[in-house]
Amino acid sequence: QSVLTQPASVSAAPGQKVTISCSGSSSNIGNNYVSWYQKVPGSAPRLLIYDNNYRPSGIPDRISGSKSGTSATLAITGLQTGDEADYYCATWDTGLSVLIFGGGTKLTVL
Amino acid sequence: EVQVVESGGGLASPGGSLRLSCVASGFSFNAYSVNWVRQAPGKGLEWVSSISSRRSYIYYADSVKGRFTMSTDSAQNSLYLQMNSLRAEDTGIYYCARGQGGIARDGTADIHFDYWGQGTLVTVSS
């Protein structure tokens, strides 16, 4: 069980909005930056968000990130079937001196 | 074009060893951290180890500390993971990733992984 807690699954219809939460503590999310990754089976992970809310080049603006206190959130609007994947938050844990991933959230586009 | 390509995976017996390699291209190798992340079958992503830019620091997950050793060869733009005393739970796909950011003097970290390889499969079984 990860130190960062994510819902196991979320779902929404095409065109709708979904949010994925990532809950941690002061030793990780509370004092460090959060990144988000998309993982499609058979493919390498892809960076979606870094430093809480920045998108790398090529990531559409319908994908956004935010952080408040010891929690972070990934939001995807205008859902597409191609968004079906597993999503992971990640951050450094200052107390443990390790990088931690959340347990992952499976997104289903109904 | 930035690329990282892993190799060296395969079948190993419990208690055995494997050495993974990752060759980087398209960027200044020593200017970025380089990292290993794995995914066991049916499980989530798990960070394994990182070596900082300028190669000042190496970090390991508790699950591999004392068994795995990370090293680099700047002349070859290569990263290695020597894996000893392998266990069944080490089975999975191992990804090499370029890292951005680091740990500031106040302890705040902004580490993230922007380029990933396709992974190499490690299977530990008798």
Image: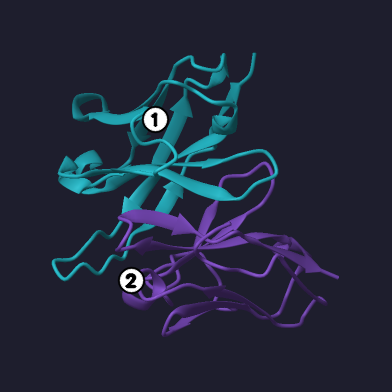
Chain colours: A purple, B cyan
| Percent x, y of residue A24 | 47, 72
Q: Is residue B108 above or below residue B25?
A: below
Q: Using the image, name the chain to which the residue with label 2 belongs.
A: A
| Percent x, y of residue A65 | 50, 78
> Which structural element holds mark 2?
loop
Q: Is residue B123 left or right of residue A83?
A: left
Are labels 1 and 2 on one chain? no
Camera-near label (1 vs 2) is: 2
Q: Is residue B35 left or right of residue B124?
A: left
Q: Using the image, name the chain to which the residue with label 1 belongs.
A: B
Q: Is residue A99 above or below residue B8?
A: below
Name the residue located 37 percent from the left edge and 29 percent from the top edge.
Answer: B68
- Between A38 and B40, the one nearer to me in the picture: B40
The residue carrying pointer 2 sits among few (fewer than 14), some (14 to 19) or many (20 or more) residues within 10 Å by Cα, namely: many
The residue carrying pointer 1 sits among few (fewer than 14), some (14 to 19) or many (20 or more) residues within 10 Å by Cα, namely: many
- Between B5 and B17, the one nearer to me in the picture: B17
| Percent x, y of residue A77 | 66, 81
Q: Which mark is residue A32?
A: 2
Q: Is residue B22 above or below residue B18?
A: below
Q: Amino acid at mark 2?
A: Asn
Q: Amino acid at mark 1?
A: Cys
- Residue furthest right as drawn: A110
Name the residue located 41 percent from the left edge and 37 percent from the top edge.
Answer: B4
CA gap between label 1 and label 2 equals: 28 Å
Q: Which mark is residue B22?
A: 1
| Percent x, y of residue B87 | 54, 26
Q: Which mark is residue A23?
A: none
Name the residue located 57 percent from the left edge and 45 percent from the top edge.
Answer: A44
- Between A37 and B25, the one nearer to me in the picture: A37
> Which structural element holds mark 1?
strand
